[in-house]
Amino acid sequence: MSNDIRIRKGLDIHLEGEADKTTQQLPLASLYGIKPNDFHGVIPKLLLREGNEVKAGEALFFSKSDERVLFPSPVSGTIKEIVRGERRRVLEIHIAPSQEQTFKDYGKKDVEEMQGEDIKAHLLSAGCWPFIKQRPYDVIANPDGKPKAIFVSACKTNPLAPDYDYVLKGKEQVLQTALTALAKLTTGKVHVSVFKDSSLSPFRNLKGIVVHNVSGPHPAGNVSTQIAQISPINKGEVVWVVTPQDLVVIGELFLTGKVNLTRTVALTGSRIEKPHYVTALAGAQISGIVGSQVKDVAATRIISGDVLTGTKVSETGFLGFYDDQITAIPEGNDYDLFGWAKPVANKISLTRSLTFSWLNPKKKYDLNTNTNGEQRAFVVTGMYEKVFPLDIYPMQLLKACLYKDLDELENLGAYEVAPEDFALTEFVCVSKQPHQQIIRDGLDLMMAELG
């Protein structure tokens, strides 16, 4: 079987504000925050209280459904505040970092000498298990599960996505250590996808993996797209997914005995003064990362993540636990009079009616957050299928989620998808329906009813 994956359906959204390949080393932020909402489906049980001291890598809480799954602190310091919502639900854990950072030592390990169960136990005890997600359902993997394969996508195609060839340069040793460890957790293979035209990828010369060359428009970089081409998921099967920067954390755990949640974060978007890369710890306060880089803060949407799947945050908010990108774009508070009835040259559209983006597909746009319409009933236009490369009927699957038909969800391929796979269909939707939330609710229903 060929290791080339070529995707034809999709849409590349070219935006202004791509990060320059320069990296700035940032000092510690003044405050860090861990949000249990970043870990979908997890009900946290706290291990520490306000005022307690904590070391970097020490567990803050565990999952109520599985006490083995721990969630680590990104820094050493003091638990400043535990923010609660309705019914005392934990929303955020704020940590004031200490001047001198101290790490909890989990001991160096030689992965070559370890068995699969030993590796699993070490990842669980060190709080690194949340970095492994599973399909179906796109949640933290069940430690008792047996995946048929493990997938890593090192070719993000999201708008303004970080360049992993640059971000991971020189980290071949930690990547190899992590991949060797993960290979012992599956009876199948570890599949890593890179861009076909990328000769500098650090994964090219690593051992014990199968490298796939990906080409095509977004969502070619989505791991679901790659799984569908390499090893589709059937009922009862499970695959695990790990992101490249999380591989670095896992590799450093075995090599140094420390949980180092440092990430290389891309500051992107037209409202960033000078788009570039910075080093920051997971959960860092946004103001400590962007500094004074954001232009016209009052009229700017800051997003932890990319414009399609990220989360809106303020300067007092925090970087998402899994995010390696911050995007700043104009807030869409303005409206065009008769905008639907006049020619448009500054927006992206799949249609050719009064729009001209198809004439210059490489043009970069300064788009804002305006949805250019309001939510209404689904309209059958055929646009979803043009940007959805999976062998699934997107409209029918969305409707099955809405009327909660479990049999249809299974038959239509819900086991293979994650909310991010419907980000593009949501972008082109003339009905302005929240596709990603609809899919998330449908997957939650399946997980609760079918397990």
Image (spheres, helix red, strand yellow):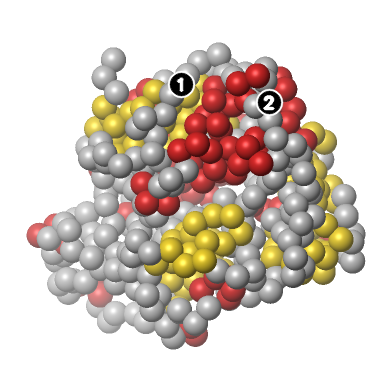
The kind of secondary structure element at disc 2 is helix
Where residue 119 is drawn, which disc sits there? Answer: 2
Which quadrant, please, contains the C terminus? Answer: top right
Q: What amino acid type should be assigned to the residue bearing mark 2?
A: Ile
Query: Residue 17 location in percent, x, y?
Result: 33, 69
Q: What amino acid type should be assigned to the residue bearing mark 1?
A: Gly
- Residue at (55% x, 69% y) in the render: 26
Frontmost residue, 441 versus 148: 148
On screen, residue 56 versus residue 267, left or right, reads: right
- Give the farthest residue toward the left: 359
Query: Residue 280 location in percent, x, y?
Result: 57, 62
On screen, residue 2 versus residue 60, left or right, reads: left
Position above or below: 285 against 220:
below
Which quadrant, please, contains the N terminus? Answer: top left
Query: Residue 135 location in percent, x, y?
Result: 54, 30
Residue on which disc 1 sits: 208
Mark 1 and mark 2 in contact? Answer it, CB < 8 Å: no
